[in-house]
Image (cartoon, rainbow, N blue to C red):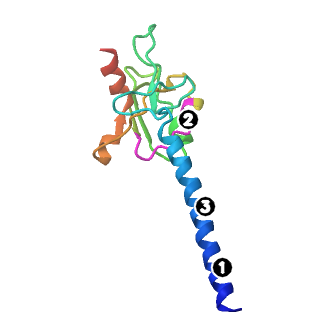
């Protein structure tokens, strides 16, 4: 190979690179004048679809003016991430247990929904809240029963 063929190869590479640069810049300029499709997030909030699965929350039932959790522990045993702790109390011996505390560590929750599916009383559901940012790890540990009481008051 002579110096002339090396020079031709070098010029061909420059022309090929220049062509791809022009094509890329053409696409960029075309997109520059198209309407914005991105939601400008803090200024505009997203509307979630009905199928969106946010974090877990308890359902408020009008007939009992509370939730129906009986602290059976099925959700605790089913959870693959082991992030649920349930504590229940009985008012009298022989009566049903009533769920008093229901803690979920949302910093480790995978939002798989097995706890919602397995609940025999159907007291758990998915929320439509999507802003789950915490300043501390402990802010992500939430008592769902206390949260339900705060929302219903």
Query: Camera-side residue: 132 or 116?
Result: 132
Span of residues in magenta: 105-116
Q: Mark 2 and mark 1 in contact (Cβ < 8 Å)?
A: no
- Give me the residue at 51% from left, 48% from top: 28
Residue 19 percent location from the top left of the image: 60, 61
Query: Camera-side residue: 49 or 111?
Result: 49
Quadrant of the image occupied by residue 39: top left
Residue 143 percent location from the top left of the image: 35, 33
Q: Mark 3 and mark 1 in contact (Cβ < 8 Å)?
A: no
- Reading the image, the residue beneath label 3 is 19
- Reading the image, the residue beneath label 1 is 9
- Give me the residue at 49% from left, 26% from top: 48
Mark 1, Cα crowd under 10 Å, few <14 / some 14-19 / many 20+, is: few
Residue 64 higher or lower than 100, as above or below: above
Mark 3, Cα crowd under 10 Å, few <14 / some 14-19 / many 20+, is: few
**Viewport quadrant of the C terminus:** top left
Label 1 vs 3, first from the N-terminus: 1
Mark 2, Cα crowd under 10 Å, few <14 / some 14-19 / many 20+, is: some
Q: Is disc 3 placed on a helix, strand or loop?
A: helix
In front: label 1 or label 2: 1
Q: Main secondary structure of the magenta part?
A: loop
- Reading the image, the residue beneath label 2 is 113
Most distant residue in the top direction: 63
The answer for how far apart the CA atoms under marks 1 and 2 are is: 60 Å
The answer for how far apart the CA atoms under marks 3 and 2 are is: 51 Å
- Is residue 36 one of those drawn in magenta? no
- Give me the residue at 52% from left, 31% from top: 53
């Amino acid at each position: 190979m002579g110096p002339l063929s090396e020079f031709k190869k070098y010029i061909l590479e420059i022309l090929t690179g220049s062509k791809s640069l022009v094509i890329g810049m053409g696409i960029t300029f075309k997109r520059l004048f198209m309407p914005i499709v991105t939601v400008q997030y803090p200024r505009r909030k997203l509307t979630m679809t009905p199928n969106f699965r946010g974090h877990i929350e308890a359902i408020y039932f009008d007939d009992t003016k509370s939730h129906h959790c009986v602290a059976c522990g099925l959700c605790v045993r089913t959870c693959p991430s082991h992030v649920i702790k349930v504590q229940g109390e009985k008012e009298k011996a022989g009566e049903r247990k009533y769920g008093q505390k229901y803690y979920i560590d949302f910093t480790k929750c995978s939002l798989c929904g097995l706890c919602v599916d397995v609940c025999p009383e159907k007291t758990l559901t998915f929320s439509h809240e999507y802003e789950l940012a915490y300043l501390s790890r402990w802010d992500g540990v939430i008592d769902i029963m206390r949260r339900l009481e705060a929302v219903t008051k």
